[in-house]
Every structure is written in C-alpha cells, then in structure tokens.
Image (cartoon, grey):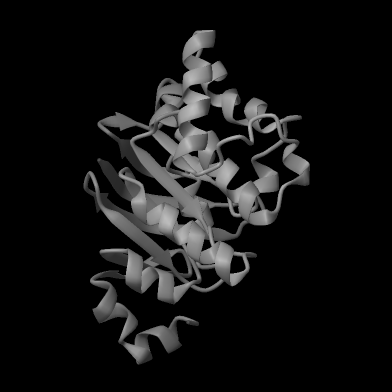
Amino acid sequence: MIDIAHLSFCYPNGYQALTDINLNINPGEKIAIIGQNGAGKSTFLLHLNGIYTGKGQVVICGLPVDKKTIKEIRAKVGIVFQSPDDQLFSPTVFDDVAYGPIYMGLKEDEIHERVTKALDDVAMQGFAERITYHLSMGEKKRIAIATVLAMRPEILVFDEPTAGLDPRARRNLICLIEQLSQTLIVATHDLDFAQKSFSRIILMNHGQIIADGDPQHILNDTRLLEVNGL
C-alpha cells in the first residue's frame, strides 16, 4: 500500500530532516512511529500526501506522489495534525467536516451523508451546528478526525493524537483510533499507547529508521530506547 525508497529531505535552512528512508507498509497494518523530538516523525508523515516532497520516491496505492497525482493521493491519505486548531478553520463543525467532500466535487446530498456518517463514527452526533472554537480539546480532536473520515481515505495518519488530552479524553480517543479499520500510521510519544494498540513499531532518530518490528521487542530494549532519547 505504501512503498518508500531512498527518501531524503532537507529544509531550506540546510537542516537534514530525513536521510535515505526505505519502508514498505501493507494494507491494514497498524503502525506506531516513535522517536524523540526532532527525530523526523512529522516531516516523514507530511510526505505521505505530498505536503512535503523530498528526494527519492513515495508510492501510495500504486501512485507515485507528484503534482499530477496529488489530488488523488490526498483523497487516499488523510492526515490528522497534532493540533486540531491547525485543521479546523470554519465557522461550524458541519462546515469543517464538509470541506473535504466539497473539495472532492461531491453533490450536496452525498456531502450531507458523509458529514453525518463521519460525525457518527467519532461519536459527535448532534454537533454539526456547534461553533468549533467553543469545543474542548478532546472534542476538537474528534472533529478533526471526522474531517478526514468524510474523505473516506484508505490510509489514516495521525501526528501525536493523544497530546494535550486529560486521562479520560486520552482513553476515549485511543478507543476510537483502535476501532478504525483503515491502515493506520501514528506518530506518538505515548509509549504505552504504542505498545498496546499497534502491531508494528518504527523507531526514528536523526531522520533515519533505527528499528522496525514487534512492539514488545523494541519497547523492552531499554538500551535501545535510552540511546535514542526515549
């Protein structure tokens, strides 16, 4: 489903954020990406739907990520940012969740159907006319997920989904994420979440993949975690 070959990325200021990333992800996999701040996790995620484009090749569902395929790629890969305020910008919840389907050129009836289904999926029924700005952080995160689900992507990407949540909101969000059927790629500092909810862990540091495999094996390797800032 995702094939990445020799992906490298350097920011305009000269900072080398990714170096020679090679990775294959199969349909239906649930993957946690862990690593200290600055490891390259977020930069990597933003290559999966063309927000960033580095050297090398990123192929999503058989399509190389480039200017010609970008609209189709973004319908296949939904990204939920760490801060929902980076994703929610419309006057009401309905407007935010409807934005993607409108961008896709769907008819009004299907837009309404998708918004209703997405809000149901995140247990936010009845919130369509609420003002997004007035919601709690946990509610905003659920709405941010709904904005992506309304696009019906095949791949869901989360950047630090549990950050900034109180214990109850964290548990509720984890339960929601665990119920999602799409291929999941989640960058997180929450090692307990990574261990319990994912079948594969990728450890990154200094823009490279340091380890890739079974969560128990990686997270029980104290020396590996210490060396890589975890």
Observer-nearest residue: 168 or 181?
168
Q: Where 75 falls versus 226 (above or below)?
A: above
Q: Where 74 falls versus 110 (above or below)?
A: below
Residue at (45, 60) in percent of width and height? 174
Residue 34 location in percent, x, y?
Answer: 43, 69
Residue at (53, 58) in percent of width and height? 161
Q: Residue furthest bottom?
A: 223
Left or right of 114 on screen, residue 211: left
Q: How many marks?
A: 0
Q: Quadrant of residue 2?
A: top left
Q: Where 124 falls versus 9 (above or below)?
A: above
Q: Residue furthest front?
A: 126
Do we see residue 210 in this rendering? no
Q: Quadrant of residue 132?
A: top right
Residue 29 location in percent, x, y?
Answer: 25, 52
Residue 103 location in percent, x, y?
Answer: 55, 18
Q: Where's the N terminus, which quadrant?
A: top left
Residue at (26, 50) in percent of width and height? 25
Residue 73 location in percent, x, y?
Answer: 40, 29
Observer-nearest residue: 125 or 86?
125
Q: Where 70 falls versus 206 (above or below)?
A: above
Residue at (66, 25) in percent of width and height? 95
